Amino acid sequence: MLKDITLGQYFPIDSVLHRMDPRFKIIETMLFIVLLFMGSSFWILALGAVFVLLARQLSNIPMKMIWKSVKPILHILAVTAVLNLLFIDDGDVLFQWKLLKVTEGGITTSLFMMIRIVLLIIGSSLLTYTTSPILLTDAIESLLSPLKRVKFPVHEMAMMMSIALRFIPTLLEETDKIMSAQKARGATLDNGKLTERAKALIPILIPLFVSAFRRAEELATAMECRCYRGGEGRTRLRTLKAAPRDYIGFAVCLLFLAAAAVLNILL
């Protein structure tokens, strides 16, 4: 299961979305999230689905990678759907057994929430799939640059966010190795009661934290050896410059947002 988690991974392939300015991609991702939460109509989600399909087509990311980004949250989706089915009492009753009751409103809400979460995960994953950690750091720093006037550590904040995102796959791989080592020693991690499973996580969490702190110390030492002094006087290998494709993509995103606003008013 841990190997299927692709959060924070970057896939260096050539595509239109890969060549776009990362600042525009961050803004468009935020606008896409706003679009998904603008209303409670399935037409809004249909617009979001069209936007995701268009972005996926421009990114050339294989569908199996998109599936890997959704697969780890299937359990969460199932729990969310069941809770909505059982606790939302709206519309005609379709099924009832003692205290359990399923209504049309519960089914509609369950489907709506599941589709919204899936679209949210896919749209957010496309940002990290198509943007390298270095460019993501530069983009965040550029977008937050107005905060430098109030002495906000913009560069340090952007660097921390990028490093945290970058090390998610590394920590997941380390966790998988530790779990395999514990199972080889006879540890039972998947069986037993809930309390027993929780206690079985202790031999995994302790070495994981030790490994994380060790990696953090090694990274800090490597940055100091390379005379890293933060953003002051720092030069960049690549200077972020907007191209016509970036403005076209931003305009298309605004059109989707405007269409969602019109649908929300009409419906």
Image (spheres, rainbow, N blue to C red):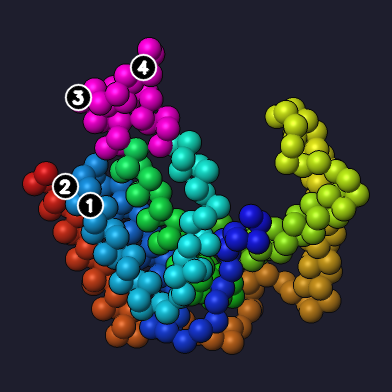
- Residue 97 bears which disc, if any? 4
Tell me the tag on residue 216. none
Identify the residue position indicated by label 3 in the image: 92
Say if the magenta span includes residue 85: yes
Residue 116: % across, % down: 35, 49
Give yes or no for contact between labels 2 and 3 (Cβ–Cβ under 8 Å): no
- What residue lies at 79% left-to-right and 52% top-to-bottom? 179
Q: Is residue 220 left or right of residue 112?
A: right
First of labels 1, 3 by sequence position: 1
Q: Nearer the viewer, mark 2 or mark 1?
A: 1
Q: Amino acid at mark 4?
A: Trp
In the rendered structure, the answer to whether residue 96 lies left or right of residue 233 reads: left
Q: Quadrant of residue 246?
A: bottom left
Give yes or no for contact between labels 1 and 3 (Cβ–Cβ under 8 Å): no
Residue to which mark 1 is pinned: 44
Label 1 to label 3, Cα distance in Å? 24 Å
Residue beneath label 2, please? 264
Residue drawn at x 27%, y 37% as measured from the top left: 108
Please report the bounds of the magenta region as a residue range: 81-109
Helix, strand or loop under label 3: loop
Secondary structure under the numbered disc 4 in the rendered image: strand
On the picture, is 29 further left or further right than 9? left
**Whole-Å distance between the Cαs marked 4 and 3?**
15 Å
Whichever of callouts 4 and 2 sits on the residue coming sooner in the sequence is 4
Q: Which residue type does callout 1 highlight?
A: Ile
How far apart marks 2 and 1 lie (CA) works out to 8 Å
Element class at badge 2? helix
Identify which residue is drawn at 45% across, 43% down: 77
Q: Contact (CB < 8 A) between labels 1 and 4?
A: no
Which residue sits at x=11%, y=44%?
A: 267
Could you say where residue 181 lies in the image, as x and y percent from the top left? Answer: 86, 55
N-terminal label among 4 and 3: 3
